[in-house]
Image: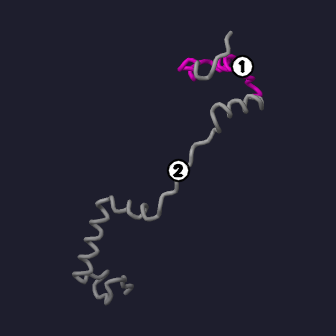
């Protein structure tokens, strides 16, 4: 049997029985890969790690909050409340706090 590369395998290898896949890649189902096979795989395919996304700047995170139309509705409501002098409860002297009376 010729030496098959990982790129030459059947595209539906994941649907094959486990024993067939182990034979195809010449693996031991109980021990897994030996150290030499791991080194060869890492040399060929690179480390088994996803690249890390660059950190998102704080200003961009802040600016994304303004994509939602709800924030504009809340701003308009706050401006109207301040302009009309609306308070938390009747009889409260400050528009910024709720009365506990």
Q: Please check the rendered image and state whether residue 11 is part of the magenta-colored stretch, yes or no.
A: yes
Mark 1: secondary structure: loop
Label 2 belongs to which residue?
A: 53
Question: Callout 2: few (<14), some (14-19), or many (20+) C-alpha neighbours within 10 Å?
Answer: few
Considering depth in this image, is 88 or 2 the residue closer to the camera?
2
Residue closer to the observer: 30 or 9: 9
Residue 32 on the magenta segment: no
Disc 2 element = loop
Q: Residue furthest bottom?
A: 93
Comparing labels 2 and 1, the label whose residue is closer to the camera: 2
- Which comes sooner in the sequence, label 2 or label 1? 1
Q: At which x and y percent is residue 68?
A: 32, 59
**Is residue 54 shown above or below 75?**
above
- Crowd band around label 1 with a 10 angstrom C-alpha radius: few (<14), some (14–19), many (20+): few
Q: Residue at x 68, y 9 (%)?
A: 1
On-image quarter of the C terminus? bottom left
Tell me the residue at 36%/82% (across/down). Answer: 98
Front residue (pair 86, 53): 53
Residue 67: x and y in percent read: 33, 58
- Asked where in the image residue 44 lies, by quadrant, the reply is top right
What residue range appears in magenta? 9-31
Q: Which residue is mark 1?
A: 26
Vertical order, 89 against 68 (above or below):
below
The mark found on residue 101 in the picture is none
Mark 2 → mark 1, Cα distance in angstroms: 36 Å
């Amino acid at each position: 049997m010729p030496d098959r590369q990982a790129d030459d395998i059947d595209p539906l290898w994941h649907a094959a029985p486990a024993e067939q896949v182990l034979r195809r890649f010449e693996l031991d189902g109980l021990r897994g890969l030996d150290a030499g096979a791991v080194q060869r795989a890492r040399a060929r395919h690179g480390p088994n790690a996803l690249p890390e996304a660059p950190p998102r700047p704080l200003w961009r995170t802040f600016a994304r909050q303004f994509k939602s139309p709800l924030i504009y509705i809340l701003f308009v409501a706050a401006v109207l409340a301040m302009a009309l002098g609306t308070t938390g409860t009747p009889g409260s002297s400050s528009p910024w706090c709720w009365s506990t009376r």
